[in-house]
Image (cartoon, helix red, strand yellow):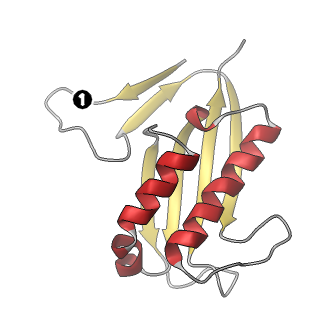
Amino acid sequence: MTQVLLPTGWPRPKGYSNGVAATGFQVYIAGMIGWDAQCVFHSDDFAAQTRQALQNIVDVLREAGGKPEHIVRMTWYVTDKREYLAAGREIGAAFREIIGCYNAAMTAVEVRALIEDRAKVEIEATAVIPAT
């Protein structure tokens, strides 16, 4: 069971939730970057790397029997806030296509660098798969 938390009188955030309450089997997904399963980058484009990172999250989640709608929290680490904001439309489209119209609690943080030099974004995720 998942419940989006929106305090009375607060405006609904766009693309995320302020909080999520969930019960079930917890899955913690390490930071995923924009390379494929063989650790190969196919693009240096921010939106393309984000799309791949989101797909990597879904692939790992699937191994636990989960689906994108089970994601309750994401933390995004970006190397360039302006590049992230400029790619907003493409990122939103990739998110809706891969994750869906689901609003997890999210945080985005600009960092100086990521461990992989070509990586522009790294996304951690937490999911809660409902008990059956």
Residue in the foreground of this view, choosing between 92 and 21? 92
How would you rate the neighbour count of disc 1 (Cα within 10 Å): few for under 14, some for 14-19, many for 20 or more? few
**21 horizontally vs 48: left or right:** left
Image point (71%, 38%), residue name: 27
Pick whichever, 16 or 52, lies toward us.
52
Q: Quadrant of residue 83?
A: bottom left
User: Which residue was labeled with disc 1?
Assistant: 7
> Could you tell me residue 40's position as x and y percent?
79, 77
Percent coordinates x, y for residue 113 in the rendering:
57, 84
125, 83: nearer the viewer: 83
Horizontal side of 90 relative to 38 (left or right) equals left
Residue 28 appears left or right of 97: right
Going 13% across and 30% down the picture, which residue do you hit? 9
Q: Nearer the viewer, residue 114 or 60?
A: 60
Q: Is 114 located above or below residue 130 in the figure?
A: below
Q: Which three-letter amino acid code belongs to the residue tagged 1? A: Pro
**Residue at 77% from the left image edge and 67% from the top image edge:** 36
The spot of residue 98 in percent (x, y) is: 58, 48
Query: From the viewer's perspective, is residue 35 above or below residue 44?
Result: above
**Which quarter of the figure is the C terminus placed in?**
top right
Q: Is residue 55 left or right of residue 63?
A: left
Q: Residue furthest left?
A: 9
The residue lying at 76 percent from left, 39 percent from top is 62
Q: Secondary structure at mark 1?
A: loop
| Vertical arrangement, residue 20 with respect to residue 115, above or below | above
Which residue sits furthest bottom? 117
Q: Residue furthest right?
A: 38
